Image (cartoon, rainbow, N blue to C red):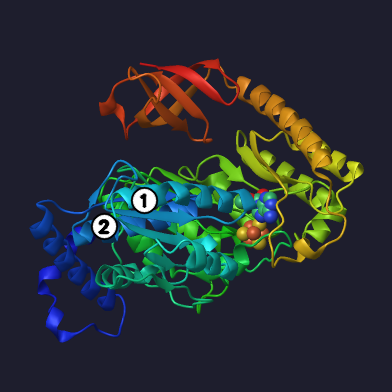
Amino acid sequence: MYNEIDLDQIDLYAGPPIEEPARQYYFMAKCREQVREFEKKNGRRPCFFTQTFGCQMNARDSEKLCGILETAGYVPAENEEADFVIYNTCTVRENANNKVYGRLGYLHKLKQKNPAMQIALCGCMMQEQKVVEKLKKSYRFVDLIFGTHNIYKFAELLAQMNESDKMVADVWQETDQIVEELPSGRMFPFKSGVNIMFGCNNFCSYCIVPYVRGRERSREPKDILREIERLAADGVTEIMLLGQNVNSYGKTLETPVTFAKLLQEVEKIDGIRRIRFMTSHPKDLSDELIDVMKHSSKVCHHLHLPLQSGSSRILQAMNRHYNKEAYLELADKVRKAVPGIAITTDIIVGFPGETEEDFLETMDVVKKVKFESAFTFIYSKRTGTPAAEMENQVPQETVKDRFDRLLKEVQAIASQKAEELTGTLQTVLIESVNDHDASMVTGKMDNNSVVHLPGTPDMIGTYVTVRLEECKGFYYYGKTAD
Ligand code: 5AD
Ligand code: SF4
């Protein structure tokens, strides 16, 4: 998209416009001037490196940052030994924060060797006041800090950072703005994430996301569809619709639209072969959506449906608005309506007050639903959430023991389920050369399972029919079938 922008038309002497996105284009043009100055001085253009922590939303945000940097003339670097390093952070669990602090130590050393290096931190962790205070006090070598609400202002902040020798920090508490038509890079030429909404209104009692991503805001369907049409015209065939709770998409729009309706519109776009979405909240998963999934030839046979706990008592304390029976019923309904669908989930172990009986309820759901795959997490106390104030935090050894038991069960079931497909023919979208063996390629099935097969780089981005020869637990070895 950014190829269409003519930054040369922008008069930098005129001053920045007030309205968006024109304002950001002005600052992209300004950054490009700064890049030219850098080039005159150094005989090369500045290079940048972005590191994403956390979820698909953050990965998509990082692509937007890359798009702006490349529009301004920055070139991508392989690693942190770059002129400009950005960490797009996550704060969903405490260890996500710890990882960033650890990596900052490394960046500090690099900056001591190369004082001209610039460092930016953005994303969810920056929305926490105590984090920014700590950075301002003890990490003065950081050049730019911004949050999730003003990421659309990145070009402006970049220009400001380039002109300042002090730390620039700009973090907003909230926004109701969605700025469309900004450039975006893409990690893969053949697939892309597409934000359909931002923020979350659910306030699950353990979760910090609603505090750092703000209230739920949906993009207008026409903007989403236009973005996907452009992606399709550019060769993208698989899209992943992104939101914290896609099932409540469209409720706050002036003309409300359901997620199921949006999916039907996306389905009509020529060139798109696969549609994925993430994440669904069980409380909002409608029959209408199940019906669309059932009849669609493009919506993938994969549903990520976070369970969090199998205990109705704990689910209530988590503020999840469903109980064990409702979840089981829903999973059953989905499996019946869409045969062959893979249901994956997120589970938290050790929520405050979780007893052995509660934990066994979770194990029971795992055994009954037979998830194709599950992300299991140890409960992490997040300051500011209601759960952090709850008594009966579960002792660490107990949590660790439950976590190990759960993981074992989840893995045993997942590999049992995967084994059932061995020997079948599957359509695989080839995504990359295999990490360990250059004579192999790696791709994904419609149900999101990973397949490795002999192949060559020219297959990347194509759909091939593959016979699954050997199941290795959560991935397969296969061969192209002629
Ligand atoms: N502790 C552990 N896991 C958490 N998640 C969200 N908040 C926490 C927390 N405080 C998990 C949930 C969610 C996933 C993205 O992260 O399972 O679905
Ligand atoms: Fe967090 Fe719950 Fe919102 Fe998911 S739905 S982001 S777990 S508050």
How many numbered discs, if any?
Answer: 2
Q: Quadrant of the N terminus?
A: bottom left
Rendered position, 131 above or below 332: below
Mark 1, secondary structure of its residue? strand
Q: Residue at x 49, y 55 (%)?
A: 89
The image quarter in which residue 158 lies? bottom left
| Disc 2 residue type (three-letter) | Ala
Q: Earlier in the sequence, mark 2 or mark 1?
A: 1
Rendered position, 142 above or below 179: above
Q: Which residue is mark 1?
A: 50
- Of 119 and 200, which appears nearest the observer? 119
* Marker disc for residue 185: none
Is residue 260 something one can see in this rendering? yes
Query: Is residue 298 toward the left or the right of residue 48 in the image?
Result: right
Q: Is mark 1 within 8 Å of ligand 1?
A: no
Provide residue 446's location: percent of width, then percent of height: 49, 35
Q: Residue at x 26, y 53 (%)?
A: 83
Q: Quadrant of the C terminus?
A: top left
- Of 215 and 194, which appears nearest the observer? 215
The image quarter in which residue 143 lies? bottom left
Q: Residue at x 57, y 53 (%)?
A: 97
Q: Residues within 10 Å of mark 1 (few under 14, many from 20)?
A: many
Query: Is residue 442 toward the left or the right of residue 213 in the image?
Result: left
Query: Is residue 108 toward the left or the right of residue 6 in the image?
Result: right
| Disc 1 residue type (three-letter) | Thr
Q: Residues within 10 Å of mark 2 (few under 14, many from 20)?
A: few
- Of 239 and 36, which appears nearest the observer? 36
**For discs 2 and 1, the disc positioned in front in the rendered view:** 2
Q: Which residue is mark 2?
A: 116
Provide residue 437's location: percent of width, then percent of height: 37, 18
Q: CA distance from mark 2 to mark 1?
A: 17 Å
Provide residue 377's location: percent of width, then percent of height: 68, 44
